[in-house]
Image (cartoon, rainbow, N blue to C red):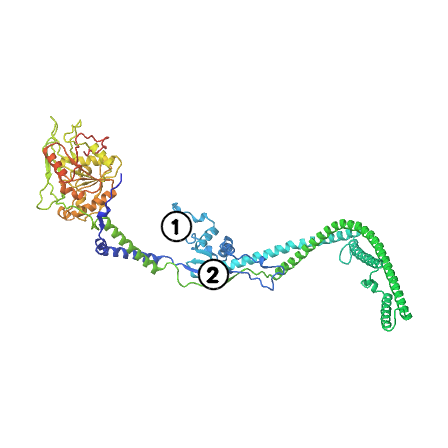
């Protein structure tokens, strides 16, 4: 069932809300001062703790003059964020902390071993089993546990600096321990490096001896194989056969080139002689000394013939003799050219013969070189093995000399150094009395202010109707100051009783009439003792058979089913016949509550007829106390003794004072409908104007009746005519409560 909300009709009165701070300022201040005083006392009595810090820089400290010759940047330690974090874990390791604890003898101090000077209270707690016996844990573990609780090692962000913080009750000890941890860490790193060098030297010494023997054996195998295979080495460190083959190949290429050149030149001279061409274009012919002299003589004869032709005719004996000499010179030149041609041919034949010889030699060397190549494979394998062993031997020798020299001189540079030693603190870091007291005062002041505001808010005193809300004014909400009580006064015997009734005062204005009150008298059976008189709401007549409907009224079960099915948030019951009919509201509220919904009954009757059967008393605070600002919601809501329903009784406050705050009823109704699925209001003999302020969204109006008389009919007609056409008549007659009453309790209805 959904809760119907009209939150827009309710507003918070901020002035009233914050005025509660001024009204309760003394209580707020007293509580704040008490809390502040307790904080000051605790801070003053607390044990003081001092903190000191030592800083260590992680960096390479190897000098360029002592660095090994083969080292490079890749050999440097990794000093990134992960490397610094690794060093942090090493510094806080158990090994280093144990060394420091043993060096400073921390096990004798109570601060690190609670078994030292143990108090009688601690011994008693251990004996009764309320505290673990620290003697069950070894001394070293107890000291280490305390040291870890006081130690804080961390890497400074974006640097290679590690901070070592330690807190202690003794300021000197707070400074000595981080310095001792840093010194132990550096000494440990140096010892680790020295141990590494010693282990390396011890490992390299026998390895070097073995390698020296292996190198000698490998080189001896190379020499023996070379002599056995006749693999002589030439000038360029190659096999002799291969070197000769290369040289003959070069010579063969040169001879072939000369032969080709001689043959080509001889062919050129032969073609020139056969075709009668000029021999002047052939360089081999012109390079002959005899041909050059013949050419010079030929030039002179042509010059003489040209001179003689100027004065003599062609048949002149002198010209004819000169031309005859010129012809002889041409014949001699051609004869010399033929000799040159024959010489070139002979040169080509000689080169051809040389070529043939070289080809034969090359073929012979090829076979020898191929055989040498096969043998060279085995030789190369032996040489590689010998070279690898020699290289490893040289490397081991270099490393051994380096390790031995560092070991002898005890020179092991550590990649860390202390850049800031701890200073003995003069001021305790805990407790800070000023900040603690200030924080306690501010927090207590704030909490008390919030508590006061919430108390004022939930009490309803800081609530007021919203500016846009519309509420119809009513003249009266009848509420009593004291509930009606019936007391049985025994007289002379057990069969005679006297009744003493306390008449209630109506919570109305002085000029308003008081509603009628009635009491049901239960007639005794024949021969039975006189029955006691009970409040009207507690004595609802129950018929054995359900009466027939006269005015269309419905029974309690039907009314409950209607409320559940319609999803109503409020149910207003009007009882024109008086308190006797108030049982309808009680029975309907319990019926809906038994269905699993959260139900609250608000009693607005003059006599408390609706709440008295549910609480068996009329002395509980209720709606009048809430309206008079004498109680809060949590103080006026009570559980029904016979069901899961809740009830707000009439209350015990002054009704006149309560009526002055009647305008707060809509706000109270809104708060109740927000918290409960259904709010049942028993108004007694009220009219339409009297119940108008109690209505809202999802509201059902019921008229309780016992007898279909004119009074009920007139009340129903007035309600319908005044804006409640969907009025429902309900009767409690014929209702039988389900189940069996709880033992020791009487039925409430």
Question: In the depicted view, which residue is nearer to us: 443 or 719?
Answer: 719
Question: In the depicted view, which residue is nearer to us: 676 or 207?
Answer: 676
Question: In the depicted view, which residue is nearer to us: 642 or 3?
Answer: 3
Q: Is residue 656 visible?
A: yes
Callout 1 secondary element: helix
Callout 2 secondary element: strand
Disc 1 marks which residue?
122
Q: Are marks 2 and 1 in contact (CB under 8 Å)?
A: no
Displayed quadrant of residue 236: bottom right
Displayed quadrant of residue 556: top left
Q: Is residue 482 visible?
A: no
Query: Image quadrant for the N terminus?
Result: top left
The residue at the far bottom in this view is 311
x then y, percent, for residue 719: 14, 38
**Classed neighbour count for the residue bearing mark 2: other residues with Cα under 10 Å, few (<14), some (14–19), many (≥20):** many
- Which numbered mark, 2 or 1, is in the foreground of this view? 2
Question: In the depicted view, which residue is nearer to us: 95 or 537?
Answer: 537
The numbered disc on residue 54 is 2
x then y, percent, for residue 203: 64, 53
| 27 lies left or right of 306 | left
Of the two numbered discs 2 and 1 on the same chain, state the one appearing first in sequence.
2
In this rendering, is residue 417 above or below 524? Answer: below
x then y, percent, for residue 20: 22, 54
């Amino acid at each position: 069932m959904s809760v119907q909300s009209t939150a827009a009709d309710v507003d918070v009165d901020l002035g009233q809300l914050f005025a509660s701070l001024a009204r309760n300022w003394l209580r707020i201040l007293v509580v704040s001062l008490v809390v502040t005083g307790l904080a000051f006392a605790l801070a003053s009595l607390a044990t003081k703790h001092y903190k000191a810090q030592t800083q260590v820089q992680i960096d390479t400290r190897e000098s360029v003059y002592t660095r090994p010759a083969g080292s490079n940047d890749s050999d440097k330690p990794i000093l990134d964020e992960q490397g610094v974090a690794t060093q942090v874990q090493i510094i806080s390791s158990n090994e280093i902390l144990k060394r420091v604890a043993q060096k400073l003898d921390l096990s004798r101090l109570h601060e690190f071993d609670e078994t030292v000077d143990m108090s009688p209270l601690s011994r008693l707690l251990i004996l009764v089993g309320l505290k673990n016996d620290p003697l069950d844990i070894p001394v070293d573990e107890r000291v280490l546990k305390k040291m870890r609780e006081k130690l804080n090692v961390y890497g400074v962000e974006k640097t290679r600096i590690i901070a070592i913080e330690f807190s202690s009750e003794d300021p000197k000890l707070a400074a000595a321990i981080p310095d001792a941890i840093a010194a132990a860490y550096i000494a440990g790193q140096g010892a680790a490096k020295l141990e590494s060098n010693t282990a390396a030297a011890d490992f390299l010494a026998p390895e070097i001896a073995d390698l020296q023997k292996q190198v000698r054996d490998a080189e001896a195998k190379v020499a023996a194989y070379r002599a056995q295979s006749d693999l002589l080495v030439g000038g360029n460190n190659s096999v002799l056969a291969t070197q000769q083959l290369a040289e003959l190949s070069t010579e063969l290429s040169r001879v072939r080139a000369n032969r080709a050149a001689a043959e080509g030149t001889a062919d050129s001279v032969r073609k020139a002689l056969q075709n009668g061409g000029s021999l002047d274009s052939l360089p081999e012919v012109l390079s002959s000394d005899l041909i050059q002299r013949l050419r010079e003589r030929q030039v002179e004869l042509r010059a003489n013939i040209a001179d003689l032709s100027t004065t003599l005719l062609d048949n002149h004996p002198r010209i004819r003799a000169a031309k005859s000499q010129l012809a002889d010179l041409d014949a001699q030149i051609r004869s010399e050219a033929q000799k040159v041609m024959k010489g070139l041919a002979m040169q080509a034949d000689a080169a051809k013969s040389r070529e043939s010889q070289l080809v034969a030699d090359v073929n012979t060397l090829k076979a020898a070189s191929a055989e040498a190549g096969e043998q060279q494979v085995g030789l190369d394998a032996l040489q590689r093995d010998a070279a690898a062993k020699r290289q490893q031997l040289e490397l081991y020798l270099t490393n051994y000399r380096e390790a031995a020299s560092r070991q002898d001189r005890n020179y092991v540079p550590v990649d860390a150094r202390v850049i800031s030693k701890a200073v003995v603190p003069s001021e305790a870091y805990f407790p800070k009395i000023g900040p603690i007291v200030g924080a306690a005062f501010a927090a207590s002041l704030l909490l008390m202010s919030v508590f006061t505001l919430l108390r004022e808010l939930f009490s309803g005193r800081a609530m007021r109707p919203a500016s846009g809300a519309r509420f119809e004014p009513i003249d009266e909400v009848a509420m009593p100051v004291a509930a009606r009580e019936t007391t049985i006064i025994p007289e002379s015997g057990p069969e005679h009783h006297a009744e003493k009734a306390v008449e209630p005062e109506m919570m109305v204005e002085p000029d308003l009439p008081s509603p009628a009150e009635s009491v049901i008298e239960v007639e005794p059976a024949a021969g039975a003792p006189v029955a006691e008189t009970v409040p009207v709401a507690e004595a609802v007549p129950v018929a054995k058979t359900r009466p027939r409907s006269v005015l269309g009224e419905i029974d309690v079960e039907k009314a409950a089913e209607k409320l559940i099915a319609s999803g109503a948030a409020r149910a207003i019951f009007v009882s024109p016949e008086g308190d006797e009919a108030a049982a309808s509201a009680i029975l309907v509220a319990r019926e809906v509550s038994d269905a699993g919904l959260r139900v609250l009954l608000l009693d607005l009757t003059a006599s408390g007829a609706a709440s008295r059967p549910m609480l068996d008393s009329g002395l509980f605070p209720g709606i009048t106390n809430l309206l008079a600002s004498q109680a809060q919601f949590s103080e006026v809501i009570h559980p029904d003794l016979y069901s899961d329903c809740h009830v707000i009784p009439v209350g015990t406050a002054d009704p006149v004072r309560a009526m002055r705050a009647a305008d707060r009823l809509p706000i109270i109704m809104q708060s109740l409908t927000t918290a409960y699925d259904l709010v049942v209001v028993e108004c007694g003999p009220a009219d339409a104007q009297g119940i108008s302020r109690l209505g809202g969204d999802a509201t059902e109006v019921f008229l309780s009746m016992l007898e279909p008389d004119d009074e009920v009919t007139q009340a129903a007609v007035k309600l319908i005519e005044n804006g409640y056409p969907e009025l429902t008549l309900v009767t409690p007659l014929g209702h039988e409560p389900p189940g069996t009453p709880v033992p020791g309790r009487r039925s409430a209805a």
